[in-house]
Amino acid sequence: MGTVAAIGARTDVGGLALAGVDVLVAEDPEAVRRAWRALPATVALVLLTPAAAEALGDAVTAPVPDRPLTVVMPS
């Protein structure tokens, strides 16, 4: 079974650590892209803030084999 990760601003994703989510704090678009590229292969689900999803653009929906399931949190 894979793990769950969240990418976004600390204020938006920090509390998810209490539920066992791997929190990757990314406060700006470049940090979001770095966090996305650094996701471990064990991650099965990625939760993105709306700002993080916007920073990733097509990378979120591009058809890539073995890409984790990605969900954008409501704003």
Image: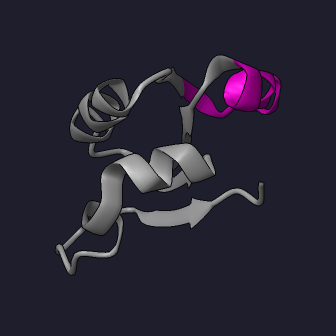
Q: Residue at x 25, y 29 (%)?
A: 34
Q: Is residue 15 magenta?
A: yes
Q: How is the image coloured?
A: one colour
Write down the quadrant of residue 67 in the picture. Answer: bottom left
Q: Main secondary structure of the magenta part?
A: helix
Q: Residue at x 36, y 45 (%)?
A: 42
> Residue 4, image x and y in percent?
56, 45
The foreground one among 57 and 62 is 57
Q: Residue at x 17, y 74 (%)?
A: 65
Q: Is residue 33 magenta?
A: no
Q: Residue at x 57, y 39 (%)?
A: 6
Lateral position of residue 64 relative to residue 40, left or right: left
Residue 2: in sight, yes or no? no
Write down the quadrant of residue 8 in the picture. Answer: top right
Lateral position of residue 41 relative to residue 25, left or right: left
The span shown in magenta is 11-23
Lateral position of residue 67 relative to residue 16, left or right: left
